[in-house]
Amino acid sequence: MENSEMNTAPEMIEFSEQNPSDVKDWYVNNHTEKALAELIYDVLLAMCEADDHANACEKGSEEHHEWLSIAMEWESLYCKLEDEILAIMEKEGFDLSEGTDETVNAFRISRGYDKIFYTAEAAAAETAARMKKEKNTYYRVKHNGMIAKKSGWDYWIYENDEWVRDTESVISDMIHGYDAGEPEGSPYGFGSTSVMDEIEEISYEEAMEKIAEDIIANLIFSWRKKYRKAKQEWDENPGGPAKHADICFTLFNCRYTLVPEDFGFTKGPMDEGFMESIHKELEKDLKEAGASEIESCGFPD
């Protein structure tokens, strides 16, 4: 938090050096969601810094006890701020009765309560949490693997990496067994079991897993085109070889690992070296696609 915004706080000094009681008093007088968002992360850092100071002191010393006391004051304030976030979520209709750490974290990031972590993967986490909270029903079309959902009265189809409204009533017709081959006015136009058997209801997790697989397949296809020329130049004038090159990431709560073979690279250490050379660009594209917890690996051979 910028100290200039703390108009009743102590003079301009490092946040962690301020008196927790003074910061608490400031928040009582500036009790807004914006103030909460700006305050909570700084309080967490101050708590950790006070803990670090305590650990650096001789145990049992007066200084050690003093820093422990300060850390506990910061922790007490941090817990109060966390409780306020949960209260806001409950007010907005979030169900907090079960294990909801993922939802809480996504909510905190999306509202700026953990501002330093607001990145592309945070936005993806926010989207996933919101989709899971929505009362949607998900479907899979058996013959082509297409994913769809019903949200309210509308049906949506996931295609080209986005949800598109089903204006042609493709999903609705399948669910109700509409057989376009029947003549107009036929009593068998709806209720066809063979048509209805072509679509099945699936869970949110199953839908997200299939969507993630489609996103990854599209990324790999685009990467092969994007790096075709660079790969040819690498083969002609290779850089350093590598081993154990891969890139791991999480997408819609599923963990994936890509290795050189996924890109069609099969020439051993030199191909692994090329993959390692483009790790940073791959990471950037994965973040833009909504992936999180991205880890690249590779060792000189």
Image (cartoon, helix red, strand yellow):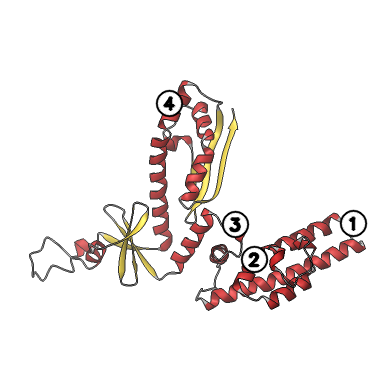
Disc 4, SS: helix
Q: Earlier in the sequence, mark 4 or mark 2?
A: 2
Answer left or right for 68 relative to 99: right
Residue mark closest to the camera, 3 vs 1? 3
Residue mark closest to the camera, 2 vs 1? 2
Alpha carbon distance from label 3 to label 1: 34 Å
Answer left or right for 14 relative to 219: right
CB-based contact (under 8 Å), mark 3 and mark 1? no
Q: Which mark is residue 163?
A: none
Q: Position of residue 142 (x, y in %)?
A: 28, 55
Q: Earlier in the sequence, mark 3 or mark 1?
A: 1
Circle 2 sits on which residue? 38
Q: Which mark is residue 58?
A: 1
Circle 4: residue type: Gln
Residue most toward the right? Answer: 61
Alpha carbon distance from label 4 to label 3: 38 Å
Answer left or right for 77 relative to 144: right
Circle 2: residue type: Glu
Answer left or right for 78 relative to 245: right
Q: Earlier in the sequence, mark 4 or mark 3?
A: 3
Circle 4 sits on which residue? 232
Circle 1: residue type: Glu
Q: Earlier in the sequence, mark 4 or mark 1?
A: 1
Residue mark closest to the camera, 4 vs 2? 2
Q: Earlier in the sequence, mark 2 or mark 1?
A: 2
Alpha carbon distance from label 4 to label 1: 61 Å
Circle 3 sits on which residue? 117
Q: Quarter of the image holding residue 200?
A: bottom left
Q: Position of residue 300 (x, y in %)?
A: 60, 29
